[in-house]
Image (spheres, rainbow, N blue to C red):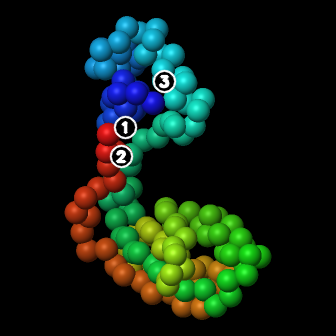
């Protein structure tokens, strides 16, 4: 990966709907070499996809909680079952396995506190191997999800 590939990645992270012509102009290439580089970045797995960034408040999902999960059982089967079950809960928009304690961090969105409480009681607490859930409610998004640094 060279400096031009990094410029392409930076530009696409800001605006993934850019045409190849616009992208080529932004990074200082002609269209064909730019297109080849983008395809190579896609084939190699550096670019994993394209998506729209949606305003959670605009679609009624402005309530956000960070949930720290401590597992009671940590055998391979339980962890795999937990991870598979978490992946099926649409309100969990991010899940990370951590070193140390707690074992997992989940980012959860819902419409409001009552919906979150129901989700925690009905779905999160029932996940395989869970010993303890600790929730922290997000007051304000200070740094929104942003492109990776160049």
**Marks 2 and 3, the one that precedes in the sequence:** 3
Q: Name, please, the residue furthest toward the right.
A: 77
Mark 1 to mark 2 CA distance (whole Å): 8 Å
Proximity of marks 2 and 3: CB atoms separated by less than 8 Å: no
Return the residue nearer the eye: 114 or 45: 45
Q: Establish if 78 lies above or below 39.
A: below
Return the residue nearer the eye: 22 or 77: 77
Q: Which of marks 1 and 3 is in front?
A: 3
Q: Report which residue position mark 2 lands on.
A: 148
Residue 93 in view of the camera: yes
Residue 120 in view of the camera: no
Mark 1 closeness class: few <14, some 14–19, many ≥20 residues within 10 Å = some
Task: Name the disc covering residue 13, or none.
Answer: 1
**Marks 1 and 2, the one that precedes in the sequence:** 1
**Marks 1 and 3, the one that precedes in the sequence:** 1
**Number of numbered labels in the structure image:** 3
Task: Name the disc covering residue 38, or none.
Answer: 3
Q: In which quarter of the image is residue 14?
A: top left
Query: Which residue is located at x 55 percent, y 30 percent?
Result: 42
Q: Is residue 46 left or right of residue 54?
A: right
Q: Where is residue 32 in the image (x, y as percent from the top left)?
A: 46, 8
> Quick one: SS at disc 3?
helix
> Quick one: SS at disc 2?
loop
Query: Which residue is located at x 37 percent, y 37 percent?
Result: 13
Proximity of marks 1 and 2: CB atoms separated by less than 8 Å: yes
Q: Quadrant of residue 84?
A: bottom right
Where does the N terminus fall, quadrant-wise? top left
Q: Quadrant of residue 45?
A: top right
Q: Position of residue 46 (x, y in %)?
A: 52, 37
């Amino acid at each position: 990966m060279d400096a031009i590939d990094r410029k392409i990645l930076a530009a696409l992270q800001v605006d993934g709907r850019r045409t190849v012509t616009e992208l080529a102009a932004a990074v200082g290439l002609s269209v064909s070499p730019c297109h080849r580089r983008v395809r190579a970045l896609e084939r190699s797995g550096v670019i994993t996809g394209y998506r729209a960034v949606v305003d959670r408040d605009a679609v009624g999902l402005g309530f956000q909680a960070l949930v720290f999960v401590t597992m009671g059982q940590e055998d391979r089967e339980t962890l795999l079952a937990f991870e598979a079950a978490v992946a099926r809960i649409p309100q969990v928009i991010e899940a990370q396995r951590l070193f140390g304690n707690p074992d997992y961090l989940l980012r959860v969105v819902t419409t409001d506190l009552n919906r979150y409480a129901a989700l925690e009681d009905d779905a999160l607490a029932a996940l395989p191997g869970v010993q303890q859930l600790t929730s922290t409610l997000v007051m304000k998004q200070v740094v929104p999800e942003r492109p990776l640094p160049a």
